Amino acid sequence: MSAIEVIPVRAFNDNYIWTLVKGGNAAVVDPGDAAPVLEYLRAHKLALTAILNTHHHADHVGGNEELLRHFKVPVYGPHDERIAAVTKRVREGDRFTLDGIGLELSVLEIPAHTRSHISFHSADMLFCGDTLFACGCGRIFEGTPAQMYAALTKLMALLDRTRVYCGHEYTLSNIRFALAAEPGNAAIADWEREAAAQRARGDVTLPSTIAREKAANPFVRCDQPGVIASASKRAGRPLSGATSVLAELRDWKNNF
């Protein structure tokens, strides 16, 4: 039985359209642009069997309609009318198997970046859109810091070996912020050296892993003394509670 490959199809400036390939079949996660997907499918003689959407932003769903003109496939996504192409709306706890790929995925609801944001995960893969990034998290557009912290906590409960496939190549900029937020963390410095070498070669820095995020990502380390101290210094007052620390970190990162 052939293994599933996860291929980053690049789009726009820094998006990755994760393409799951097995045999002659493929499923895509968050196709913001159809053109690079169609090019990849044609070049590798693949048939599209499913589309997955994590949230409604155009750079994640903008290619849906064009792909559906070429392939009549199910579109899995959240209960959100802003993604009109979705044919199979899913919510927390739902499970389904991708046709032609044979991969069972489970759904988690992780609102904050958007109100209906979801993720898809298997035993060892997580497709989390713009909620969890490598060494960072998404901006909070339609939720609250409390929701973001709850979402990240939920994702951190997955197995440490789980590979994290997020939606953008933000790793180096996130690491630079993490070094400011927790300057004594050797895991961040090690990651910076690795990611810098990858980008110098033109390589993708993803996927990360849940274990690596726990060790280096300040947004999931809001209970750690070094992160609390940095956030409190920036706020100009002592902060207590992970939500208040995350809120300060997110505002800091927005202006970093």
Image (cartoon, grey):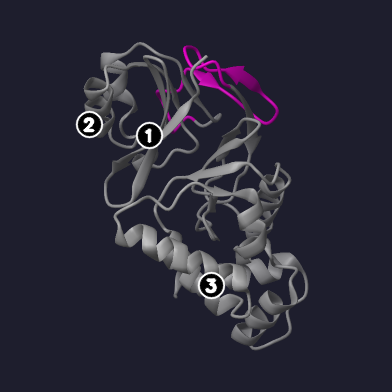
Q: Which of the labelled discs sits on residue 35, or is there none? A: 2
Q: Position of residue 122 (x, y in %)?
A: 62, 30
The mark nearer the N terminus, 1 or 3, is 1
| Secondary structure of residue under mark 3 | helix
Amino acid marked by disc 3: Ala
In the displayed structure image, the side of residue 210 where residue 46 appears, left or right: left
Extent of the magenta region:
81-103
> Residue at horizontal 65%, vertical 21%?
95
Amino acid marked by disc 2: Ala
CB of mark 1 within 8 Å of CB of mark 2?
A: no
Mark 3 lies on residue: 189
Magenta region includes residue 96: yes
Q: Position of residue 32 (x, y in %)?
A: 33, 37
In the displayed structure image, the side of residue 81 where residue 64 appears, left or right: left
Between 108 and 48, the one lying in front of the other is 48
The reply to whether residue 251 is visible in this rendering is no
Amino acid marked by disc 1: Val
Image vertical order of residue 169 relative to residue 48, above or below: below
Q: Which of the labelled discs sits on residue 61, or is there none? A: 1
CB of mark 1 within 8 Å of CB of mark 3?
A: no
Mark 2 surroundings: few (<14), some (14-19) or many (≥20) residues within 10 A:
some
| Secondary structure of residue under mark 1 | helix
Magenta region includes residue 92: yes
Between 44 and 170, the one lying in front of the other is 44
Mark 1 surroundings: few (<14), some (14-19) or many (≥20) residues within 10 A:
many
Image vertical order of residue 234 relative to residue 71, above or below: below
Mark 3 surroundings: few (<14), some (14-19) or many (≥20) residues within 10 A:
some
Distance in Å between CA atoms under marks 1 and 3 = 35 Å
Residue 62 lies in what quarter of the image? top left
Distance in Å between CA atoms under marks 1 and 2 = 13 Å
**Which label lies toward us, 1 or 3?**
3
Residue 44 lies in what quarter of the image? top left
